[in-house]
Image: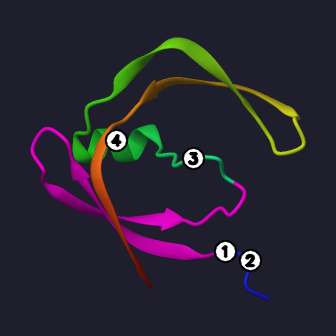
Amino acid sequence: MLKEVWLDIEIKKTDTYKGVTIKALLDSGAMGIFIDRKTVAKHGFKLQKLERLVRVKNIDCYDLAKWLSHFLFLFSIFISFI
């Protein structure tokens, strides 16, 4: 049985409109789009600081003891299946 679905996605930066293609893991339970700091740094995305920290919890409300501190504006996202 397939346990993971990876997609090639292209995201465009809001400052330069330059497109960057990255691999993304599809998570059908996610309530948003998330990107790790290594990918942000590698491609030079500009993060915006949140007004306050947001606690990260699992779907069953289990506290993961992690916090979101920044967000990223994207111009567009294009998805194609691998």
User: Is 24 rendered above or below residue 7?
Assistant: above
Q: What stretch is highlighted in magenta?
A: 5-29
| Residue 4, label in figure | 1
Tag 4 or tag 2, which sits nearer the N-term?
Answer: 2
Q: Do the residues labelled 3 and 4 touch (CB within 8 Å)?
A: no
Tag 2 or tag 3, which sits nearer the N-term?
Answer: 2
Cα separation, mark 3 vs mark 1, equals 18 Å
Residue 70 image offset from top left, x and y in percent: 45, 25
Left or right of residue 74: residue 54? right
Kindly identify which residue carries mark 4: 40
Cα separation, mark 3 vs mark 4, equals 16 Å
- Depth check, mark 3 against mark 1: the one in front is 3
Cα separation, mark 2 vs mark 4, equals 26 Å
Residue 11 image offset from top left, x and y in percent: 29, 57
Tag 1 or tag 3, which sits nearer the N-term?
Answer: 1
Kindly identify which residue carries mark 2: 3
Tag 4 or tag 3, which sits nearer the N-term?
Answer: 3
Determine the residue located farthest toward the bottom in the rendered image.
Answer: 1
Of 38 and 1, nearer the camera is: 1
Q: What element carries label 4?
A: helix
The three-letter amino acid code for the residue at tag 1 is Glu
Residue in the picture at 40% in, 42% down:
38
Kindly identify which residue carries mark 3: 32
Q: Do the residues labelled 1 and 2 touch (CB within 8 Å)?
A: yes
Tell me which secondary structure the magenta stretch mostly adopts.
strand
Tag 1 or tag 4, which sits nearer the N-term?
Answer: 1
Left or right of residue 17: residue 7? right
